[in-house]
Amino acid sequence: MAQSTIPVSEAPDERPFVGIAFLLAATTIFPLQDVIIKFLSDAYAVHQVVFIRSLFALPLVVLIARFEGQLFPLKIGSWRLQITRSLAAFFSYTCYYLALSSIGLAEAVAIAFSTPIFVTLLAMGFLGEKVGVFRILAIFMGLAGVLVIVQPGMGVFQPAAVFALLAAVFYAVSIISTRKLGRSTNGTTMTVVTVITYIIGGGLIGIIFALAPMASPHPSLDFLFRDWSWPQAQDWLLLAIIGGTAAAGFFCLAQAYRLAEASVVTPFEYTAMPWAVLWGWVFFSDLPDAATWIGLVMIISAGLLIVFRETVQNRRVVRRKGLGVFRQR
């Protein structure tokens, strides 16, 4: 278990359980979005989907910001970190959607779950976070549980799988940038900046491919090189839905990694897998097998280990500060 470098009484922004709650909300939302995007990937370009989805998300983000009274002025903090974070998120999700269009949902999620390994390494190197044995074991236990569920075969490693791995790397950079921003910003600001970056990024890529059309060099890249087309009526509804899930999901992610150490909340991203299994059953009649349930137990065990060690550590700090039992509540 990592030793906190900030005393409990002096760290109001260090709220691991609130951060975990936000992360769990995000991992409930995003797998449903993945299902919709996989449906849309046969007809539209990935940058068009990102662009339209973000256009739908932006008004919802503004409404959330107005409700919280945080719309103006935006709390930017560091522009360098904000831009790094939002660009990393844009490339991460774009790469992930490219992978999702060509390989199975379970395979794409499994490869993307290598993110915690990169986060842990970056957190130690750039944030100075001390990651103890128990957290490291929890991360690897969760990853092992995911692999037990999906049972990836040799066919996973194709061009699309490389995009899933790149998505994990970019996502880790986004997480670390979010953590470095800390209390200098807030979830609303980060969400607004991210959504605007998605609109600009998706639009620019669309313009580039319109001005300089290129043939797809591989079937797995059709989702990238495809021309834009006017969506069907029912697809507008799907795009609006994923716009709403994007707004809610990005806000929850930003809050999660702002309120707790990256190495604390990251293992809980594994809980996206049970939801992926559920949506797979609902939409594709794919029922879990015995290996799936074994993997789920491993994932839940990893999360509980993190919570237990965090609770024990906080109580030790409280006792050393002489704050008594009421402070623990």
Image: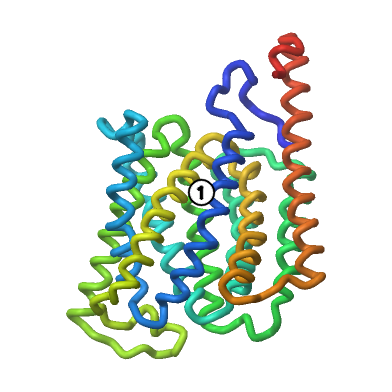
x then y, percent, for residue 263: 64, 44
Which colour scheme appears in the figure?
A: rainbow
What's the residue type where badge 1 is placed? Ile
Give the side of residue 312 with respect to residue 156, left or right.
right
Q: Is residue 57 above or below residue 1?
A: below
Toward the viewer: 159 or 35? Answer: 35
**Number of marks present in the image shown:** 1
Residue drawn 59% across the image and 47% down it = 24
Q: From the image, which quarter does the C terminus lie in?
A: top right
**For residue 241, what is the image quadrant?**
bottom left
Who is closer to the viewer here, 75 or 40? 40
Category of crowding for the residue at label 1, using alpha-carbon neighbours closer than 10 angstroms: few (below 14), some (14–19), many (at least 20): many
Most distant residue in the left direction: 211
Q: Position of residue 301 (x, y in %)?
A: 79, 50
User: In the figure, residue 237 lies in which quadrant?
Assistant: bottom left
Where does the image place residue 212, in percent across and percent down from the top left? 21, 82
Looking at the rendered image, the quarter that the N terminus falls into is top right
Q: At 43% from the left edge and 48% from the top edge, which residue is drawn?
A: 248
Q: Is residue 243 left or right of residue 117?
A: left
156 is higher (above) or lower (below) than 246: below
Residue at point 71% right, 10% down?
Answer: 323
Placement of 187 over or under 108, stated as above or below = above
Q: What residue did someone put label 1 on? A: 175
Instruction: Name the secondary structure under disc 1.
Output: helix
Which of the 4 image quarters holds residue 52?
Answer: bottom left
Q: Is residue 3 left or right of residue 86?
A: right
Residue 249 lies, in percent from the top left, at 46, 50
In this rendering, the answer to whether 4 lies above or below 38 is above
Q: Residue at x 25, y 73 (%)?
A: 206
